[in-house]
Amino acid sequence: MIEKERIAEIERRMKKHIANQVVVSKQKVEHVEFFLKNAEESLQSARCLFDISTKHDYPGYDNLSGFLWVINASYYSMFYMARALLENEGVRLKSDLSIHTLTFDALVWYFYVTGKLQKRLFEFYLKAREDAAELLGKMRAGELIEDYFYEKNKRASFTYETGERAMESKAKTSLSRATKFNKEIRRIISKK
């Protein structure tokens, strides 16, 4: 679950962004396919790099360690899926600032804080008992948001801070999270 302090901070920023029209809702739905395509291509790139880096039998790519870029491509697939979800809801982001932070904040504001993501996730579990579906839906929503936040931070850490080569297990985790996130958000978008 996201900490209450973090949610409060996001709420303060989002209120400013909305007032300054950096984030505008109720817009014409556009660019969804663009973001879905970019998400899929990023995920495929991550899978390809992971395969090349682990199988070591691709001519011309001997001993390639592309794990850092698996993490980056996995994160970007999640980022593009979040943008697709926001666009699908008519939420437009207009920023020259950190689009990544703005996207995360908007995702939390429009889909997590409001319960919208949880409500939609309930649809996936309609055949389960009512109580279990409610609990599981809330858990899944929290996991999706946390996975996105974690990958965003990990990408920044590996790309900008440590300069160290990412380990295979971290790349595998990133790829798994991105795959799960993509699948869940595509389901939400297709239900609309």
Image (spheres, grey):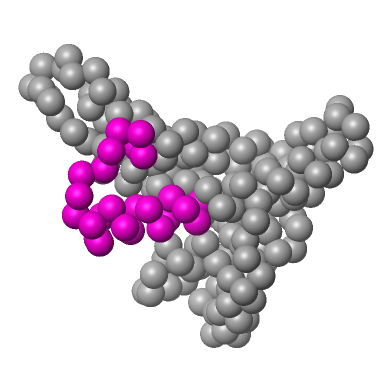
Depth check, front residue: 140 or 188: 140
Q: In terms of image quadrants, where is residue 186?
A: top right
Q: Is residue 68 above or below residue 95?
A: above
Is 56 displayed left or right of 75 in the figure?
Answer: left
Q: Residue at x 27, y 30 (%)?
A: 49
Q: Is residue 1 visible?
A: yes
User: Residue 47, image x and y in percent?
Assistant: 35, 29
Q: How many marks?
A: 0
Depth check, front residue: 119 or 24: 119
Is 73 displayed left or right of 4 in the figure?
Answer: left
Q: Is residue 72 above or below residue 107?
A: above
User: Residue 78, image x and y in percent?
Assistant: 47, 46
Quadrant location of the C terminus in the rendered image: top right
Q: In terms of image quadrants, where is residue 12?
A: bottom right
User: Residue 93, image x and y in percent?
Assistant: 50, 67
Depth check, front residue: 170 or 27: 170
Is 124 displayed left or right of 132 in the figure?
Answer: left
Q: Residue at x 17, y 14 (%)?
A: 57
Magenta part of the chain: 148-171
Q: Residue at x 28, y 38 (%)?
A: 167
* Residue extending farthest right: 130
Q: Is residue 111 above or below residue 33?
A: below
Quadrant location of the N terminus in the rendered image: bottom right
Residue 128 included in the magenta stretch of the image: no
Depth check, front residue: 140 or 184: 140
Q: Is residue 11 visible?
A: no
